[in-house]
Image: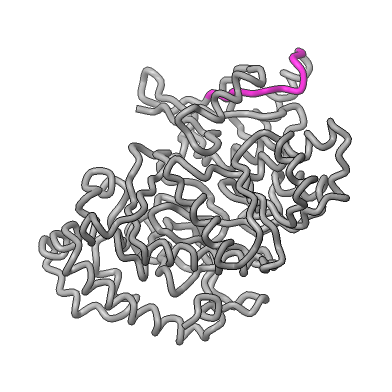
Amino acid sequence: MDLKESEYQSTDALRLMQEQKLQNLLAYLATFSPFYKQLFAENNIDITTIKTIDGLSLLPTTGKEDLQQRNDDFLCVPQKKIIEYASTSGTLGSPVIIALTKNDLERLAHNEYSSFVCADGTPDDIYQLMLTLDRQFMAGIAYYSGLAKLGAGIIRLGPGVPSLQWETIQRLKPTAIVAVPSFILKLIQFAKDNGIDIAQTSVKKAICIGENIHNTDFSLNILGKKIKEAWDINLYSTYASTEMQTAFTECSEGRGGHLQPELLIVEVLDENNRQVQPGIPGEVTITTLGVEGMPLLRYKTGDICMYFDEPCACGRNSLRLSPVIGRKKQMIKFKGTTLYPPALFDLLNEMDEIIDFAVEVYTNEIGLDEVLLHLLPTDLTEACDHRIRANLQARLRVSPAIVYVDAPALQKMLFPETGRKITRFIDRRK
């Protein structure tokens, strides 16, 4: 079944296809995976009795800690078959190596080909990639190989440097960009400051990575609104992780990221590892299909989302995920209030007095979470400070500590030398 066509099959056909692939995966893991062979044996699991997606609930979940502690035991092929070593970013602990075979790289290309098609990509498009294409970053090679399969033009420019991005846009005339939304705002500001008429440029759409541009009801959040108000281009959000080797990408309806059912089974689980109902937040838990090197079974990503299973107006019948509400381990308990970083980011993005920011969380002397906001303000006046503090108090009901920083200092926080993507949330908790 063609990857693009699979999303348009009936839900019954999709489920049957996934269950056949699940049985193949279980047999493969029982034969080749040191980690899962041990897991099945220790839990007395007879994999031949699991024939349906509902049967997944009989299996234990795995998580980031398992991958961190026993990385090599997840490998199902001899080392000579590995041709690419990707790595997680290490946001929630030590990075994890994900080894890919030739087949896995082809699967990755199919994944992004299907994603770009979902986001109205065509062979006539030219994409400017404003993201890291080295440092073992899977997304970089995924976007490149997917666009090559699509037959679109590719400009590998890398992250940052608004002046170079605009010079290249004006010279090579890309029709689309792939970028972090907050960086798109920097592009807009640079254009304003330098007399560039962005309405007359060649760019017609943006694939937004790494940050939410929608609220959970699919309306544009403040970041998305700021982009759209200044630059009338089509925005498509995407969600993925290195471990799943698959992306959820929005279509033009903007009603959540579409599952690619031939590549992944997704569960959204509550605290007791039970499937939640549509529209209820839970932890995204994935089972990879068709991965050869390091397949995963019931892997808990740590990301909290909602899912929706009614057919999309675009014609696809695949399940859709909401924007990420937060990461389970990044949840902040601050003075009796529960906060997730994305919600705090939305609030800070909304404030006209703040140009840019980073959020730091640490443990105080009695073991509780403390929040420190590093803010780049529009001006360092007492009036500006008062407006910022009053707004935070009114919206959060609590008052985080604030330190005002200049642009170079904040830049070092957001883009550490060893990092490969923006680091807006700094977790220093013990």
x then y, percent, for residue 254? 67, 63
Q: Nearer the viewer, residue 316 or 346?
A: 316
Q: Is residue 186 above or below residue 170?
A: above
**Splitting the image into 4 quarters, where does residue 414 fall?**
top right
Please name the residue shown 24% across and 66% down the image: 59
Most common SS among magenta residues: strand
x then y, percent, for residue 142? 50, 56
Please name the residue shown 38% across and 45% down the image: 87
Locate residue 93 relative to residue 262 in the image: left or right. Answer: left
Q: Name the colouring of the figure.
A: one colour
How many badges with numbers are in the image? 0
Q: Is residue 94 above or below residue 117?
A: above
Please name the residue shown 53% across and 74% down the image: 318
x then y, percent, for residue 307? 52, 65
Give the magenta part as a residue range.
372-381
Q: Nearer the viewer, residue 66 or 86?
A: 86
Q: Is residue 255 visible?
A: no
Question: Magenta segment: does it hold 355?
Answer: no
Question: Magenta segment: does it hold 376?
Answer: yes
Please name the residue shown 66% across and 40% down the image: 182
Q: Is residue 55 above or below residue 177?
A: below
- The quarter of the image holding the C terminus is top left
Q: Nearer the viewer, residue 227 or 100?
A: 100
x then y, percent, for residue 373? 58, 25
**Splitting the image into 4 quarters, where does residue 118 fall?**
bottom right
Locate residue 220 relative to residue 419 in the image: left or right. Answer: right
Q: Is residue 182 visible?
A: yes
